[in-house]
Amino acid sequence: MDKLEWIKSKIISWEELNHYISIYRFKEQKIIFTNGCFDLIHRGHIEYLARAANLGGILIIGLNTDDSVKKIKGPGRPIQDEYSRAMILSSMGFVNHVVLFEEETPYELIKSVQPDILIKGGDYNLEKVVGYDLVKARGGQVIIIDLIKGLSTTGIINK
């Protein structure tokens, strides 16, 4: 498989993801999940995702579709379409899978993935992280990774 095919092969559907999850569970591999819009990928995103990957295991990214980004961020967003954002994320060697979700929150996707570790960036209160209840009920961890202060897609756009 050439490099481009390899990158594209990491962008998968929910059905494909469920198949892979079964394999990872059988092999007793740790599943790490995070999500976001990831519009205009910047250094902060890369550092955040690398820190998530450093926890070891399979890194799965739930990526908001264009429609859900528009609902969350407003008109004019996203800057990059969902396939471009998915390609950029899947080109990172430490990312195992990228799966799109249409909802405003990844709750249903988290319910499907049942990650061992749920990662969120920023200054969230742990109990308020979407999916916290699902992950804790299975004995998993919810981890907050600090973001780089002053670095955001909105900040870049407004510059």
Image (cartoon, helix red, strand yellow):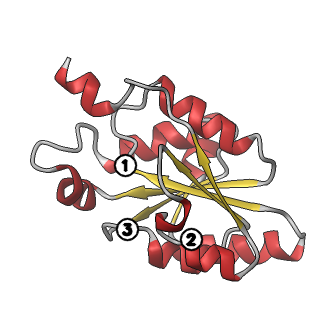
Which disc is residue 23 wearing? none
Q: Mark 3 or mark 1: name the one nearer the start of the chain.
A: 1
Please tell me which residue lies in front, 98 or 128: 128
Which disc is residue 37 wearing? 1
Please tell me which residue lies in front, 33 or 119: 119
Q: Residue at x 59, y 49 (%)?
A: 144
Residue annotated with mark 2: 132
Q: Mark 3 or mark 2: name the one nearer the start of the chain.
A: 3
- How many numbered marks have been drawn onto this rendered protein structure? 3
- Crowd around label 3: few <14 · some 14–19 · many ≥20 (10 Å): some
CA separation in Å, label 3 and label 2: 12 Å
Q: Which of the 4 image quarters holds residue 112?
A: bottom right
Residue annotated with mark 3: 105
- The nearer-to-camera label among 3 and 2 is 2
Marks 1 and 2 in Cβ contact (< 8 Å):
no
- Helix, strand or loop at disc 3? loop
Q: Amino acid at mark 1?
A: Cys
Q: Residue at x 56, y 71 (%)?
A: 132
Rendered location of residue 105, percent (x, y)? 37, 68
